[in-house]
Image (cartoon, grey):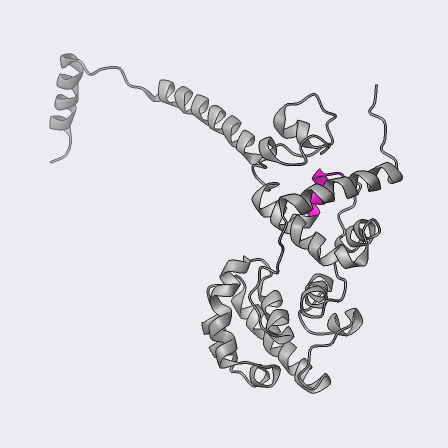
Amino acid sequence: MAAKRESKRARAARMRREYDRLREFIPVTKCQLDYRTPFELIVATVLSAQTTDRRVNGVTPELFARYPDADALARADIADVESIIRTLGFYRMKSKHVIELAQALATRFAGAVPQTMEELTSLPGVGRKTANVVLGNAFRIPGFPVDTHVIRVTGRLGWRDADETDPEDIERDVTAVFPPGEWTDLSHRLIIFGRTVCTARAPQCAWCPLNDSCPSAGDFLDLPSARTGTRRPAKRRTTAHRTTKTAKSKRTTTKSAKPPRTSTSRSREAAADDAGPR
């Protein structure tokens, strides 16, 4: 018999219960990017695409010491910016983006970072996720950044439909369940939870505080739980891969193994060598 489909009301109630547990599990939240001003945060967030916050935090002190505001960065030599952020992925494209961003701030907003979604997303290199990061953290305006961790965790927890992967749709559906004042910390907690517990390759379900209500827990714990289509962790795939690889290796070794050399075979090889060209 097919599992009973969870109603929207039941799902919303479960989401609130699970978030209450996450608040206990992760009592303190903060933006993982180091910044002192809205300008530093928006630049750091643009730089954080396709790389880790730790790497960004490693280059921004020098970048902001040399270019402390939009006016200074707008006049920067792109080669100098590239040399500072070279350790980041796509550093050439990011150097171009942050200089263009600074130029737009300097010319259109007198060097200040705007405080609306429409104005923020009109800036070069700034999408909805970056805008939500800036709004929620720099200005305390409710924002719910949706990154790869949020997409993965909300999918595994069943906080969204399995076929719903558009970040804006996820933002709309998840924030509809929670008060605006929780949106920024909710995103922080989901991101931290995704980095430390509900990881992409090997989720730590055994000690996850939500493993008794998470609809995907059975996929990773071999519990008698309904399967939701969530992919098995890479750790298991890797084990299977190693087993297959070992078996193939054994077969290859068996096929390629040579019989021990006898004195007769050695004599024949010596004779063949002697008969060859000198």
User: Which residue is nearer to you in this view: 5 or 29?
Assistant: 29
Q: Main secondary structure of the magenta part?
A: helix
Q: Is residue 59 left or right of residue 196?
A: left
The image shows residue 134, relative to residue 54, as above or below, that is below
Q: Residue at x 71, y 70 (%)?
A: 139
- Residue 159 appears in view: no
The boundaries of the magenta stretch are: 151-159
Total marks shown come to 0
Work out which quarter of the rendered image holds the C terminus and state it.
Answer: top left
Q: Quadrant of residue 99?
A: bottom right
The image shows residue 187, relative to residue 134, as above or below, that is above
Q: Is residue 36 left or right of residue 247?
A: right
Across and down, in percent, residue 86 comes to: 47, 67
User: Which residue is nearer to you in this view: 73 or 243?
Assistant: 73
- Residue 181 appears in view: yes
Across and down, in percent, residue 258 comes to: 28, 18
The image shows residue 62, relative to residue 74, as above or below, that is above
Work out which quarter of the rendered image holds the N terminus and state it.
Answer: top right
Across and down, in percent, residue 137 comes to: 67, 65
Q: Residue at x 70, y 48 (%)?
A: 151
Q: Is residue 81 left or right of residue 148?
A: left
User: Which residue is nearer to you in this view: 248 or 21?
Assistant: 21
Across and down, in percent, residue 275 comes to: 13, 27
Is residue 94 highlighted in magenta? no
